Image (cartoon, rainbow, N blue to C red):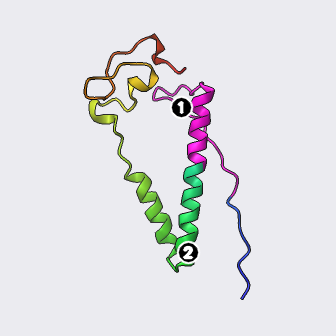
Amino acid sequence: MTAAPERQPPPLSVPIWRQPDGDPVSCAEKIKVLNENLAEIRQMCQDAFEDALLMGCDERQIRDVLAGVVEGLANPFDAAGDPTPSAAAGGTVNEDGRAGSQRGAADGDS
């Protein structure tokens, strides 16, 4: 029995990362981390996808389950209605460790 030829996924198309106001993220280090995270997630999903196929799972179901994982992600910063933590952009952190609502000059994209 011959092994199936290894198919590589198409090259990863990285997005222009945007802030909630629509402006692009301009910090090179942030963009680097976001792109690295995306590449790692893609590889992890590819590995899980291939494992499931090798174990005889239905391709459509695997894709649906992986999509469901993304859909089920919780935004831990949405409790105050603000999807981005001001602390991550140089703002304040409350006593409970959550992002504060004060925004300073460093709150923009650094």
Task: Determine the residue positioned at 39% across, 23% down.
Answer: 86
Helix, strand or loop for the magenta stretch, by majority: loop
Task: Determine the residue positioned at 46% across, 58% down.
Answer: 67
Give the numbered dot on residue 18: 1
Residue 65 is situated, as x and y percent measured from the top left of the image, at 44, 64
| Residue 28 falls within the magenta-colored stretch | yes
Q: Tell how many labels.
A: 2
Q: Secondary structure at mark 2?
A: helix
| Residue segment shown in magenta | 10-39
The answer to whether marks 2 and 1 mark residues whose Cβ atoms lie closer than 8 Å is no
Image position of 29 (left or right of 100): right
Task: Determine the residue positioned at 49% across, 68% down.
Answer: 62
Residue 11 is situated, as x and y percent measured from the top left of the image, at 70, 52
Which residue, given by chain and number where applicable, does mark 2 sit on? 53
Image position of 54 (left or right of 80): right
Vertical comparison of 56 with 31: above or below: below
Q: Amino acid at mark 1?
A: Arg
Q: Secondary structure at mark 1?
A: loop
